[in-house]
Image: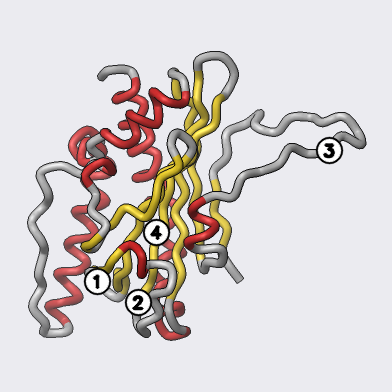
Amino acid sequence: MAIQDETASPGLSAARPTGATPPAVAPMLIDELMPAYDAVRSEHRIIAGDIATVYDAARRSDFLRAWRESAAVRVLFAVRGLGERAISLIARREHREPPPPDSLRLADLPTHGDWVLLGEDPPREIAFGVVGRFWAGETVWKTIDAADFARFAEPGFGRIACNFSLRSYGAGRTLVTYECRTLATDERARRGFMRYWRPLAPFIGLVMRSQLRVIEGEAGGR
């Protein structure tokens, strides 16, 4: 059973007249990429600007700003790094920490690599993801082609599918939803991931919210 862990903004549901036919809902990229999952986290933010402007801001936002501008995010990553180094020392294995990138923008994501662009439906949705092992004190990302993401099944790994989806919200505002889904490739990996996920989910939500604030700042020219 998937763990549902969502943070919703108040007032997002609207009453519909009894007997009215619900509007048709277009399929989402993330549903095609990962219709079933072990865990999910969603965060929402209402951002000033029309949907096309905010979508462009999401593509060009440098998400390293979330690390630079938030002391809480920096502390979380520092603690995670210390934990990985400690576990590597106990396991007597070399700890390799990759150098940080100069920037992290969705517009720059490749379709071949570790974190890859999985698809776009402008200005409604942009999806991206990664395959790796990111529990038990060691983070290893696989190099993949985006076209192979949905069917990747090598044992011992987890797939992370993320998206930003956008909807017009009244006059001159846009509701942005940031969702991350994770699915393990086998039962052993699933058990390992879920032990990692349960205590860290609230902190992952903090990082996601900080990234939504980066988009808001970019949309407002800050």
Within-10-Å neighbours for mark 3: few <14, some 14–19, many 20+: few
SS of the residue under disc 4: helix
Q: Marks 3/2: CA distance?
A: 42 Å
Using the image, tell me which numbered label, if any, was put on residue 21: 3
Q: Residue 3 sits in which quadrant?
A: bottom right
**Quadrant in which the C terminus appears:** top left
Give the image location of residue 33, x and y in percent.
Answer: 47, 61
Picture quadrant where residue 8 is located: top right
Labelled pair 2, 1 in contact (Cβ < 8 Å): yes
How far from the left and from the top, in percent, is residue 65? 22, 36
Residue 184 to residue 103: above or below: below
Q: What residue type is labelled 3?
A: Thr
Task: Read off the residue under disc 2.
Answer: 157
Q: Nearer the observer, disc 3 or disc 4?
A: 3
- Kind of residue at badge 2: Phe
Direction from residue 27 to residue 212 in the image, left or right: left
* Measured Cα–Cα span from mark 2 to mark 4: 18 Å
Identify the residue at image location x=56%, y=67%: 36
The residue mark sitting in front, 2 or 1, is 1
Q: How far apart are marks 1 and 4 (CA)?
A: 22 Å
* Residue identifier under label 4: 200
Q: How far apart are marks 3 and 4 (CA)?
A: 40 Å
Q: Earlier in the sequence, mark 1 or mark 4?
A: 1
Neighbor class of circle 2 (other Cα within 10 Å; few <14, some 14-19, many 20+) is many
Q: Nearer the viewer, mark 3 or mark 2?
A: 3
Q: Can residue 139 be seen in this view?
A: no
For marks 2 and 4 on the same chain, the one whose residue lies earlier in the sequence: 2
Q: Which of the two discs, 1 and 3, sits closer to the camera?
A: 3
